[in-house]
Amino acid sequence: MWQVDRAPHAGTPDFERFLATLNAEAGFFRTDAPITVARAPGRLDLMGGIADYSGALVLELPLGVATFAAVQPDPEPVLTLVSLEVGLDQPQVTIPLSVLFPGGQALGYAQARALLNADPRASWAAYVAGVLVVLAHERGLLPQTGLRILIDSAVPAGKGVSSSAAIEVAAMSAVLGVMSRGSGKSASIQSLNPDPQPLAPREIAMLCQKVENLVVGAPCGVMDQMTSALGEQGRLLALLCQPAEVQGSVALPPELAVWGIDSGIRHAVSGADYGSVRVGAFMGRRMLLEREVFNHEEHKRSATHSYLVSVTPSLWEQQLRQHVPLEILGADFLARYGATGDDITTVDPARIYAVRQPTAHPIYEHQRVQLFRALLQAATDNGHLLGELMFQSHASYSACGLGSAGTDLLIELVRDQLGGGLYGAKITGGGSGGTVAVLGRSDAAAAVQR
């Protein structure tokens, strides 16, 4: 008979449902070893979005839906991974430990990425097996036995609500839970560090970002993983992405509510549009470094002066905008500047990159998010001002090339209901489809449904 470590999640409404799922999938697990369970929610990006990788403040709302990971040691030296997501061509993936950890050492990140993404039908496993690769490289934690890992997610994939981050955080938390159960030679996961310390949620989030960047190959910022690991249900996580400074949580006033509406268009941060906009932003930052913008006395006072968002909108408009080109050929950029300074993306010499708008977006978005937080915390009714900031953010996404016909239609439908209790809306996360966030009065659900 197997047992589940249920204490951390027993209070969540979806835990009993997951226990029923475990019972239904009992044949996947052994009967003589405990199962460690972890839960991680998805998130709705209310404000901030793609400005995270430029150091912006973001406001993220954890969702009620989540991903569960169940992990059990297995004496067989293999990783056996199962996803219960409907529609997967290959829901079970088996990887011998000798393949992922040849000679007892983890594959390099590039090798692991090539291995785990070689078969598109099984590429979902990179989010899970990548956790073990990152823990080995970054914390010296190596599996000594096989593991059986089951993933059950209620966070919809491809909708821009961080289904991937929820998988990573849940899987890593459960794997670390297995480690905490054992010690000595019988441990399923052993540390090369003689005095390993438990990992705090912030550190788990930072490591999960490495999974996505270095193993999955998606150039995301850290806000998704931080929200999944640290977010408080029903409150906005205020995160200054420099690189991951939690500035507490912000409550929505009781008269306001937020909804997420699926545009029906699948989103992926690994897509070319998201990546090219990130490259453009880092190109712009590199050009400003060339002009010694970040050595300006106004920025020397800040320890975070090298982040693009340390440039104020007024300074950008008055002194800098004209020095950043609308676009540039990758080869021309490389010839003059050498590199962008971003370790996650690469410049394609044959591609023309937009630069000015991807550079301007985080400068203005950081300002918008700061204003949004201040308005939320004010004692007055600021719904229409908050909504206008969301509309501005959406327009800036579109100017970067990250809009879509489906999301634009939803935004216009919200505009049509501004007199019916709705205040504003915007595309979320990496853009190019996915989910639209809508802000309105708490009694405006009927307007949203229309």
Image (cartoon, rainbow, N blue to C red):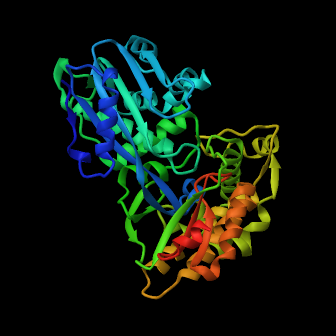
Q: Nearer the viewer, residue 304 or 292?
A: 304
Residue in view at x 48 percent, y 57 percent: 242
For the C terminus, the image quarter is: bottom right
Residue 113 placed where, x, y %?
55, 26
Q: Nearer the viewer, residue 157 or 110?
A: 157
Q: What count of labels does the image hold?
A: 0
For the N terminus, the image quarter is: top left
Report the residue that reaches farthest toward the bottom.
Answer: 380
Residue 335 placed where, x, y %?
79, 41
Whether residue 366 is visible to the viewer of this picture, yes or no, is no
Left or right: residue 206 compared with residue 392: left
Residue in view at x 22 percent, y 20 percent: 31
Snapshot quadrant of residue 318: bottom right
Whether residue 408 is visible to the viewer of this picture, yes or no, is yes
Residue 436 placed where, x, y %?
60, 60
Residue 11 placed where, x, y %?
24, 52
Snapshot quadrant of residue 50: bottom right
Looking at the image, residue 234 lies above or below residue 157 = below
Left or right: residue 396 compared with residue 240: right
Residue in view at x 51 percent, y 38 percent: 212
Q: Nearer the viewer, residue 208 or 62?
A: 62
Q: Nearer the viewer, residue 355 or 219?
A: 219
Snapshot quadrant of residue 69: top left
Looking at the image, residue 122 lies above or below residue 68 = above
